[in-house]
Image (cartoon, rainbow, N blue to C red):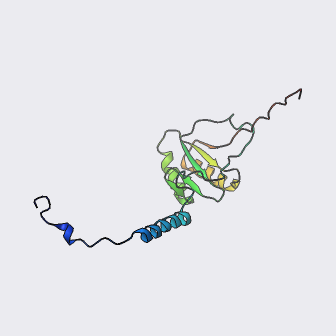
Amino acid sequence: MITRPLDLASRLRPEPRSFDTVFLVNGGLLVLFFLLFGSQFVLAPGIGVGFELPVFAGARAGATPTTHSITVKPSGLIVVDDGPANRERLRKWLVDAAKTTRQPSLLIIASHNVQIGLLAEIASMAKAAGFVNVQWAAEEPMAAAPAVEGR
């Protein structure tokens, strides 16, 4: 026949009787690997579960626009634009980032329970790298709801 000149279909192995077991085993292994090796940083690399900014009065008063930002987790994990960084990689990233703008400014987004020593170390590294301004992200406290009289 002209539509099948090589007749390849006759040379193929016959297909297996059932794919059910192989399909279920493969599906189960995929689910197992995603559960075991999945990461909370896959979708949002900088902010994970249970991340809370510190709260203090006047947090918005000194806020200014920044050119760069990093995220610091309570475990000491530091996340820059292109992924997690140790202190040496952070130092190199800060030096490179400070050269990209005329007056670089850094925003440190740190959870409320990050050690202050780590934040001070990052701030001093940023100043040494050439950042003009270093800020910590914080939230204003929620205003108390007004009391309803007459009830």
Question: Is the N terminus in the top left, top right, bottom left or bottom right quadrant?
Answer: bottom left
Question: Is the C terminus in the top left, top right, bottom left or bottom right quadrant?
Answer: top right
Image: 16 above or below 83 = below
| Residue at x 69%, y 55% (from the top left corner) | 117
Q: Position of residue 100 (x, y in %)?
A: 46, 43
Q: Position of residue 133 (x, y in %)?
A: 60, 41
Point out the residue furthest to the top here. 150
Q: Position of residue 138 (x, y in %)?
A: 68, 42
Quarter holding residue 13: bottom left
Quarter holding residue 4: bottom left
| Residue at x 57%, y 59% (from the top left corner) | 87
Quarter holding residue 41: bottom right
Q: Position of residue 112 (x, y in %)?
A: 70, 50
| Left or right position of 65 against 1 | right
Foreground pick, 85 / 124:
85
Image: 147 above or below 118 = above
